[in-house]
Amino acid sequence: MATHFIPTCWICDKPIAMENCKVDEYGNGVHEQCYVARLAHPNRKSLVELCALAAKEQDPQRLLSLVQEIDTLLEGTERLKKLG
């Protein structure tokens, strides 16, 4: 029985439908809106990275900072979805 490969976006770690799959300069599958957001903010960590850091953070001030960064990233993603 054949198994089906479902590509995931290396930025957000969510599945990408084949008809919407884009490829970055390294040949990795990516959502177009994730890639555009990453290019706009190259030093910003991905949502998955930020959530992993927040889950382990013990310092309340650093946790608040991470949550604010997560919120900013999500708001930017929502704006891109409305544009696209």
Image: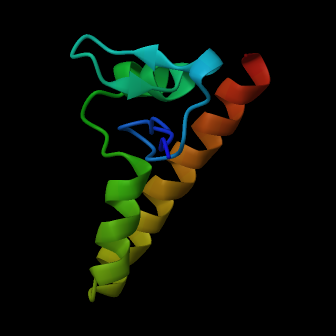
- Where in the figure is residue 61, as x and y percent of width and height? 34, 78
Q: In the rendered view, does 69 fall on the left or right side of 61?
A: right
Please, is residue 10 above or below residue 35 in the view?
below
Q: In the rendered view, does 32 fall on the left or right side of 64?
A: right
Q: Residue at x 43, y 51 (%)?
A: 47
Please, is residue 40 above or below residue 34 in the view?
above
Q: Residue at x 33, y 15 (%)?
A: 24
Quarter holding residue 29: top left
Quarter holding residue 38: top left
- Where in the figure is residue 76, as x and y percent of width and height? 59, 36
Q: Residue at x 36, y 46 (%)?
A: 46
Query: Looking at the image, which residue sits at the far front?
Result: 1
Report how many numbered discs are placed on residues in the image.
Answer: 0
Q: Residue at x 45, y 44 (%)?
A: 12
Please, is residue 35 above or below residue 65 in the view?
above
Quarter holding residue 78: top right
Q: Nearer the viewer, residue 51 or 23?
A: 23
- Where in the figure is residue 51, as x and y percent of width and height? 40, 65
